[in-house]
Amino acid sequence: MEKIDFEKIKSEMPDVKGYKEKLSELSKRISKTDDPKEAVEIIQEYFDLSDKISTQVNIIYIRFTQDTTNSEYEEAQKKLDEISPEISDAEQEFEKALLASKQLKAVEKKFGKLYIDMVKSSQKTFSKEIMDDLREEGLLTFKYNKLVSSAQIEFNGEKLNLPQLSKYAISNDRKVRKEASSLIHKFYEDNDKELGDIFDKLVHVRDKMAKKLGFKNYLGLGYLRLGRIDYNQKDVKKYRAQIKKNIVEVASKYRKKQIERIGIKRPKYYDYVINFSDGNPEPFGTTQEKILNAEKMYKNMSPEIGEYFTFMKEGNFLDLEARKGKSGGGYEAYIPGLKSPFIFSNFNGTSADIDVLTHEFGHALQAFLGSSYIPPYRSPGMECCEMHSMSMEYLTYPYLDMFFDEKNLRKYRYQHIIDALFFIPYGTAVDEFQEKVYENVDLTPEERKTHWRKIEKKYLPERKYGKECEFLEKGGFWYKQRHIFESPLYYIDYTIAQVVSLEFLVESEENYDKALDKYLFFSKLGGSLPYHKLLKTGGLQDPMTPGVIEDLIPKVEKIIEKYEKYLVD
């Protein structure tokens, strides 16, 4: 792979006028051609143009999230949000011409039925009528990101942003933990009106777009925007029922064990983040040492995997440490023009650093392995993308002594698995909440909070806030979940992927090499198949199939019991 220094790459605003002119020319050619070979060449030209635009868009987004205080980056991101609907419009016009082309069958023969199905689905998600609405949606999500990233909270004589402060919210010192947690939630409470207003506008603009496009509400449009073409809202409802039946009670059982283990008789909401009486597992090493150890780990897993990580490390495609002005969260973004993914994170010295280092590289590895496909097939739907990342977290288990001493390693593995069981009901609650919101767009901000609290109690019955945090007791917790604002309806994908990742955990405990080979084979499939076929071809059980979760959880509990014994040996 050719060496690149990403720090030296300049961002460049897409030439929308030129892009539209070129796509208009391609539209005329695909409409007129009688030559199947020429039709295929036209589609390939379209893919090349699309890659160039994607490269520019992703670099602008990356630079903005790296420093939200940089006025140049901010203006570029704002401009991009304004012109994105025009880019979508040009692409839709070309795809419309493709669907009407005499050479549609030739294109399908070359690129597959799935590509044509994707184009047909995409046509339902856009029209010129919604261009202004899309601009408004982009500006509102920008506003949310900017607001949350702007947090500068006084703590112990320092000014910290939310990711930096979150380190202290899991401190083993209960007093520190309580203060940090209170300050985090005070930030959201202080910005309650603005956050509620941003979300209210987002809900209404998304509902307006859906109705203009002929949908009953945003749910139908949202599913298609996420590329869900072979399952629907009813399937997800049934899946949520499986979670309620098979995981909620099991998760509550481990919550009780957790409270017994930490020895707090009257636990408060800020105590549930602690899994051990002597504190949560802590990794050793600086950020740079963690990166070097990760490089060794991935080389030990496989020379090919290690080579990809080294390329990213040496090319500055890793931005991992939390700092002032940096956007929160973590992500992986593929940059087609550079043939490389980029990993963004906010390391804060906790075990979450290791979660991210393994999770986001799972995304990155799949991006490398799927890079030879045409753009629509490089990565699968969101639910399968998260399977690559979450499963990688478990496949690193044999190598985690590079980040933890023996005691912390035992704690980490145990905590990591039970956290998955805690997470699945939470992610399911997020999805049910969003369904409620988009089916009832005229709920007030306060009514939305009430519905969140009701759903929260259904899936997370042990969550009790009381007078310790009235903001959370009234239903304000969901403000912290940026996906609800920025990526509507996406969050259930994490839970589906988490179930599949637990399948990989079970298989890796039985035969590690076989599980790793299966994982790599699955990753190399990219998005060349729709959801159900992709799982079947990859030899994986489908979490939406009745009985799959019910059969899986007892196997996971056996592994938890094994790691639980290690805690006291």
Image (spheres, rainbow, N blue to C red):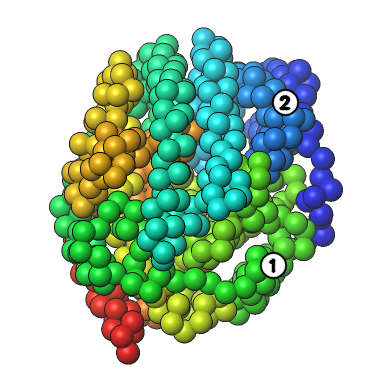
Residue 333, percent across and down?
A: 62, 47
Q: Residue at x 63, y 24 (%)?
A: 81
N-term mark: 1 or 2: 2
- Rendered position, 268 above or below 145: below
Mark linked to residue 60: none
Q: Residues within 10 Å of mark 2 (few under 14, many from 20)?
A: few
Residue marked by disc 1 = 288
- How far across and down, in percent of the image, does residue 516 sit? 48, 72
**Marks 1 and 2, how far apart in space?**
32 Å
Left or right of 486 in this view: 371: right
Please tell me which residue lies in front, 126 or 93: 126
Horizontally, residue 354 falls left or right of residue 236, namely: right
Is residue 225 rendered to the left or right of residue 107?
A: left
Give the labeled residue for mark 2: 75
In the rendered view, would you say 510 is above or below 320? below
Q: Nearer the viewer, residue 283 or 472?
A: 472
Instruction: Residue type at mark 2: give it.
Output: Glu
Q: Residues within 10 Å of mark 1 (few under 14, many from 20)?
A: few
Residue 559, position in %: x, y?
29, 76
Q: Is residue 508 above or below residue 460?
A: below
Secondary structure at badge 1 equals helix
Res 336 → quadrant = top right
Residue projecting furthest to the bottom:
569
Tag count: 2
Residue placed at 72% from the left, 26% from the top? 75
